């Protein structure tokens, strides 16, 4: 099992955290997802067979790119939508 700490952009609240936890947790091979909105950190425990790139691609598709990645307007809009969905899913 591997553990990754991924610093992400656009992480604003518990709604964002809820969306990330649920959607990244759906990936095959994920054991746990812990999101810390105060530190903009996503910690993922996963099987060796799963690639870190798959996890970061999923985060990007939700609007939460790695903090080192380009953070354009489209990505910010995706994160607002994901945040709203996460708040409604509570």
Image (cartoon, rainbow, N blue to C red):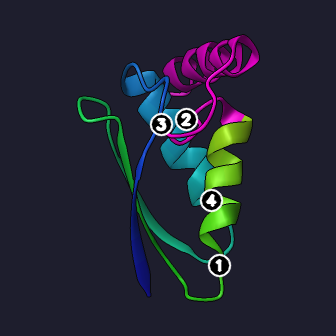
Q: Are marks 3 and 4 in contact (CB under 8 Å)?
A: no
Taking the magenta stretch, the answer to whether it contains residue 80 is yes
Highlighted range, magenta: 62-90
Q: Position of residue 29 (x, y in %)?
A: 61, 77
Taking the magenta stretch, the answer to whether it contains residue 27 is no
Residue position marked by numbered label 3 in the rendering: 67
**Which of marks 4 and 3 precedes in the sequence?**
4
Q: Are marks 1 and 3 in contact (CB under 8 Å)?
A: no
**In 3D space, how far apart are the residues under numbered discs 3 and 4 (Cα atoms)?**
14 Å
Q: Position of residue 72 (x, y in %)?
A: 68, 18
Q: Position of residue 4 (x, y in %)?
A: 41, 66
Front: mark 4 or 2: 4
Q: Are marks 4 and 1 in contact (CB under 8 Å)?
A: yes
Front: mark 3 or 4: 3
Crowd band around label 3 with a 10 angstrom C-alpha radius: few (<14), some (14–19), many (20+): some
Residue position marked by numbered label 1 in the rendering: 50
**Which of marks 2 and 4 precedes in the sequence?**
2
Crowd band around label 2 with a 10 angstrom C-alpha radius: few (<14), some (14–19), many (20+): many
Q: Position of residue 64 (x, y in %)?
A: 57, 33
Q: Are marks 4 and 2 in contact (CB under 8 Å)?
A: no
Residue position marked by numbered label 2 in the rendering: 19
Q: Residue 55 — which label? A: 4
Looking at the rendered structure, the secondary structure element under dot 3 is loop
Looking at the rendered structure, the secondary structure element under dot 2 is helix
**In 3D space, how far apart are the residues under numbered discs 1 and 3 (Cα atoms)?**
21 Å
The residue depicted at 23 percent of the width and 29 percent of the height is: 38
Q: Residue 70 — which label? A: none
The residue depicted at 61 percent of the width and 21 percent of the height is: 79
């Amino acid at each position: 099992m591997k553990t990754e700490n991924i610093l992400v952009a656009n992480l604003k609240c518990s709604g964002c955290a809820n969306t990330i936890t649920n959607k990244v947790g759906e990936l095959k091979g994920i054991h746990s997802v812990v999101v810390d909105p105060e530190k903009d950190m996503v910690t993922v425990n996963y099987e060796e067979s799963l690639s870190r790139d798959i996890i970061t691609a999923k985060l990007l598709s939700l609007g939460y790119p790695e903090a080192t990645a380009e953070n354009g307007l489209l990505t910010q809009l995706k994160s607002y939508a994901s945040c709203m969905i996460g708040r409604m899913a509570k």
